Image (cartoon, rainbow, N blue to C red):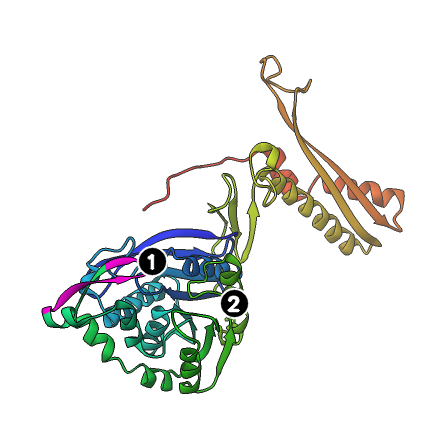
Amino acid sequence: MIHRSHHISFENAGGVRLAGRLELPLIGRPRAVALFAHCFTCTKDSHAASRIARGLAQKGIAALRFDFTGLGGSDGEFANSHFSSNVADLVAAADYLAAQWGGPHILIGHSLGGAAVLAAAARIPACRAVVTIAAPFDVAHVLRHMGDLTAVEQDGKGDVEIAGRRFSVTREFVEDARGQALADCIAHLDRALLVLHAPRDDIVGIENARQIYEAARHPKSFVTLGDADHLLIRPADAAYAASLVSAWVEPYLPRAQEEPVPPEGVVAAETAGGPFTQSVEAGRHALLADEPRVQGGDDMGPSPYDLLLSGLGACTNMTLQLYARRKGWPLEKVVTRLTHARRHEADCVHCAEAEAKLDVVTREIEIDGALSDEQLARLMEIAEKCPVHRTLEAGVTIRTRRAEE
């Protein structure tokens, strides 16, 4: 998938460093920002988290996925965490996004992460829509997969086995899960809700989706995920979920606002794509630059020299059209074709040097319209005076400095 991906970290309310990955559209600023909460004992790199976040980025929506305390790349002890602390981690992630990117406008949670986003939404003012994927209606549902918890409740702490892995949990974890009033959170959600669930989910049954949907107020939607499994292992299932989210959330995204005057100049930055792929932003406009495959690139956009020729070609056409309009001449269309090469030239001032070469741009101009020979000749003279042409022929002084931290 085509997107930009960045490792980030931030601190939760307790000062614990949490690790995340921010997926961004390949070019331009995101249309909206989403925050993804992974399933219980999973990480930000689970199939659902990574594929859905990348799918959203490909559709112009930035998505942050992060590891809850004690999981994946985050610091802290899992044994000291519980559902309420996960909700607090979500709020900390939302605060990070609000400061850096705005939003988050969308909360997405998978499995127990779905329950967490339902509980956290009221504490995230920018949130406009919530999406649950295979989420339980009751937080205590997670305890069913831990076996006999008698020892944990008696001793205050113990090991449990979940999906073939052993974890240490505390009495506080159990009591916290049993004490959650998720139904009340859903009833007072006050955000648009999309419930995604697979009918054959054998970890969290489909009846949980029905209960969540019935407890929520409108606007709400319920879409089944076909024969997907609970973890959305198959790439097609995660891609389908991402497409549903991006399409459904459209009415709830922030309306386009008057953009501030963009800064002058051009910004070029490398992407997470191929070795040469660059994201280029010129004011409000964005495009890609790359090298052709024969040069080791991925051919995702024009090469730097192609962009240079593009500027000259566009300027040539604009200059001729403007001149003809002022003169009242019947110029209908201008097409300029350009090529660039480095050649040994007889008039090169350094031709005595063995490796001396001169950059040569060949420009062919096609002019249509009921124009006289004199008018055509004058337009060809004007082509030599277009601003970009003059800049290139006069030479450019380039001053380079290191950007300040």
Residue at point 88%, 42% (across, down): 373
The stretch of residues the image draws in magenta is 155-166
Locate residue 401: give its quadrant. top left
In the image, residue 370 lies at what x, y percent?
89, 51
SS under mark 2: loop
* Horizontal side of residue 189 vs 162, given as left or right: right
Query: Between 266 and 300, which is closer to the camera in this rendering?
Result: 300
Q: Mark 1 or mark 2: which is in front?
A: 2
**Residue 387 appears in the rendering:** no
Answer with mark 1 or mark 2, whichever residue precedes in sequence. 1
Residue 188 x, y percent position in the rendering: 36, 86
Does 305 sit left or right of 153 as displayed? Answer: right
Point 53% across, 58% down: residue: 284
Residue annotated with mark 2? 227
Asked if residue 176 is positioned above or below residue 325 in the image, the reply reads below
Residue 92 position in % (x across, y down): 28, 66
Q: Spatial distance from mark 1 to mark 2, Cα to Cα?
A: 23 Å
Residue 65 marker: none
Magenta region, mostly helix, strand or loop? strand
| Amino acid type of the residue tagged 2 in the rendering | Asp
**In the rendered image of this protein, does residue 219 appear above or below residue 57?**
below
For image coordinates 36% across by 58% down, the residue present is 44
Amino acid under disc 1: Thr
Judge the density around disc 1: few (<14), some (14-19), many (≥20) Cα neighbours within 10 Å: many
